[in-house]
Amino acid sequence: MSDSNTTSNPTNAGTGQFPAGPPQGKLPPSGGSAVHAVTNVGGQFSAGPPQGKLAPGGGSAVHAVTNVGGQFPAGPPQGKLAPAGGSAVHAVTNVGAKSIGDVILDVKNISLSFGGVNALNDISFDVREHEVRAIIGPNGAGKSSMLNCINGVYVPQQGTISFRGQTFKHMNSHQVATMGIARTFQNLALFKGMSVVDNIMTGRNLRIKSNIFLQALRIGPAQREEEAHREFVEHIVDFLEIQAYRKTPVGQLPYGLQKRVDLGRALAMEPQVLLLDEPMAGMNMEEKQDMSRFILDVNDEYGTTIVLIEHDMGVVMDISDRVVVLDYGKKIGDGTPRQVRENEEVISAYLGTSH
Amino acid sequence: MAFFIETLISGLMAGMLYSLVALGFVLIFKASGVFNFAQGAMVLFAALAMARFSEWIPAWLGLESKFLGNLIAFSMAAVVMFALAWLIERLVLRHLVNQEGVTLLMATLGITYFLDGLGQTIFGSNIYQIDVGMPKDPLFLFQDTFPGGILVSLEDVYAAIVAALLVGALSLFFQKTSTGRALRAVADDHQAAQSIGIKLSRIWVIVWFVAGITALVAGVIWGSKLGVQFSLSTIALRALPVIILGGLTSVPGAIIGGLIIGVGEKLSEVYLGPFVGGGIEIWFAYMLALVFLLFRPQGLFGEKIIDRV
Amino acid sequence: MFYRENGQFKTSYRSDQQIFPITQDRWMVLALIAFAFIGVPMLVDEYMFRAILIPFLILALAALGVNILVGYCGQISLGSGAFMAVGAYAAYNTQVRIEGMPLIVSLLSGGFFATLVGIVFGIPSLRVKGLYLAVATLAAQFFCDWAFLRIGWFTNNTPSGSVSVSNLQVLGWTINTPVDKYLFCLGFLCVFGLLAKNLVRSAIGREWMAIRDMDVAAAVIGIRPMYAKLSAFAVSSFIIGVAGGLWGFVHLGSWEPAAFSIDRSFQLLFMVIIGGMGSIMGSFFGAAFIVALPIFLNQFLPWFGTLIGVDISTAAVSHTEFMIFGALIVWFLIVEPHGLARLWSIGKQKLRLWPFPH
């Protein structure tokens, strides 16, 4: 029985019998549409713990993704354990838990202050490859500032950041981008004057090689490069389901779609680590499901490590592997969602208790 | 040595005049975030108004006393500046409230051209005189220490005193009165000021009017010294480096910046000029500003600008 | 009825990305270019060439350069007059000091030197923006004003301070009649227009627009602000420099530094604002408007004056011009910040539906 909110190409919805091996609902590759497949809903897998729980009441959106012509860095197709309970999102697939790798990003003793204001105080945490790491905390806790430090927008007064073993005292934005760290912004730093396709194309800039003279003449290699990158961007457009808005100037789109374009632009960089700053702010339930779906698809299909700032606890508890909690610039919690949820200090500072 | 001091003093005096014009810029920027390129045009417009009114009024009213004639002319010019401020707020500023700085800058460029044309249409385009009774005699100081004494223009001294008084009055206005407080609130944050009940449009009219009065004083002083002519509007361009040096948001900065630029221009012209063919006054100020822009954009006294992402 | 996109489906990215995706547009532009090259010389008299068309073409080229810097990359510049001057004087020196230098090479070398100066005075853009950058570009303007007036080497040590060129030739074709000059300038404009359009729709153009719209986000994506801003200054100054060379060589014949004063900078900026910032077509509209307006006013105002019984002197006409310019700038900024180009595209939108209302 497919839930009211499942979308796109359900294959075995409801019948439940899968052959062994990863579920396959692949779309025939037809030059550019990417990605969806839906695993069973309520059925039995041949291996692994029972998965694919239905969301009680309102949410659903169950997706896993196989690899369709992916040009992203190879990563093993991954599925996730469905966390207990929860509402918005469950991602499900195949055999076994996803393999979370070694520490890819290591933040040590970061302190940041503006004038007299201490935004961050001696923060340390690590992020493992292929995982979904959430950063939560009340407003003003320093979460965005933390991401800004990683991206090189702010320079911390103290501390170091290591990426794949290389340590930096402060990051340079351009260098960070070339290393494969991409990001979305809380306040949508989109280029309002350009269309959706153009915005996402800017994400490809690092990979465009032809020089200014060739671009002026627009012949040969410059033309071919432009077309190749356009094709890649179209994959992303299909993935994010924004085909109808391709040529629209971004400023005219509703907020939820703008957020998708922001994500698309980050994805265009083919990042290894994706920093998402409140990607679901201001969205309703349905939009949150869509966005969660996209995030998990990216994590599953391309193995991209996700660092996520989010306020919706349901989402955080469901989709993240580990959570860091910040409060007034200090770290007050670090662990799996369950551990954090039971942490006294976190409860009093942020989660609250029912009376 | 005496010559050096003379050059220094004349530089200080010239700088004082720049400061007066720069003050108008700073006032408007402080209170509305608008950079008013039209300040120079306002100086010219005010000066023209004063010059012509001081000509016409005695004729219309059959006045004998020059002092009375000038007083009335000044008041009428002030009224004209008020009307100008009101019109600018109504027709231009109100419609450009949320636009970025660059758009507003270009709008003030448009206002500059408009004012130039309007001023000359209404008041005429010849050279006019302003005579407010400033003494034109030179003054010789320190005749004992230096042979012949140091030549100082009495007119400049009076101008400096007037400018100092004006600055003092403005500072008092900003710090002590409630309107001044409201102006500072608006400069900090338009929306917050609105939310506590400050009427933006009223504030802007007041600010542009005050800047207009500053322009009027500057115009009278410049005009009485040099005669009122079209080239006066290029004063705005001379005053820009002053604000860069002093800081866009700082009243003391405008004064000190003006003095530095004035002295720097004169000294460089006299001592460096002969080596490079002369006429370096105008770009010396700008080059100094350029150096500041590269190393300390906020100027000597301005606030640092922080971008939040 | 005539302007429909029905049936025009794009089957490749290449065709989707082309400059004029709508067939009717393509035909219109081709027809316009053909008319400009062939029809106009047959129909128009000398006065029109000298007073309107040639200045229009050259200033449109300069406005194109300014638009790239101000409209596409968002870096305000009040020093365009200086870059024109550098182009003109550099081209002059190349032409006069080196025997047998071809004209086009001189003009391009003018552009090249303008590029160098542009990059130098563009360096402050890495530190400041907005008004502060405007002041930095003014420094360029005043410095160049002085340099070309006082440094004798630039003017080949002529005592009068003004320089002149004569006997312009390209591969044996002597350019001396107004029609020749017109065609020469038209050629430059078409070539540079195409190159500019290619640049703004490719990666570098997107970089410029990204810097304009949000430079912090651009840096995070991996765009290097320094490279983007300086390349905008470089390309823009090159085009402006070539236009300066054309202005001096072809339009004026002999000139003084005052031809490239700050009034010229303001004029170019106004063209870009009124025409439409961030639009190639806008540069052309703006240039046409600003070139035509004074001439129109010169004819219209005295006539209007006789209608209402007021004698309007030439001085009054020039004052009115100032007032109208100023008022128009403000009006455009309030009502249609994207200028005439936006009005044009709105018109085309309506034309798509015509004769139906919606």
Image (spheres, grey):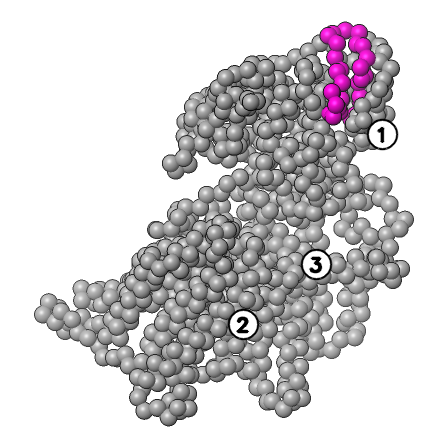
Q: Is residue B63 above or below residue C92?
A: below
Tell me, for residue A30, which label it has, or none.
1
Residue tagged 3: C342
Residue B304 in sight from this viewpoint:
yes
Residue tagged 2: B114
Outermost residue toward the bottom in this view: B62
Q: Is residue C81 above or below residue B185?
A: below
Residues at marks 1 and 3 touching, judged by CB atoms closer than 8 Å: no
Q: CA distance from mark 1 to mark 3?
A: 38 Å
User: Which tag is nearer the camera, tag 1 or tag 3?
Assistant: 3
| Label 3: element kind | helix
User: Which tag is nearer the camera, tag 1 or tag 2?
Assistant: 2
Q: Which residues are magenta?
A: A35-62
Task: Give x and y (percent) for residue C119.
Answer: 52, 50
Say yes or no: labels 1 and 3 on the same chain: no
| Label 1: element kind | loop
Q: Quadrant of the C terminus of chain C?
A: bottom right
Q: Residue at x 50, y 53 (%)?
A: B194
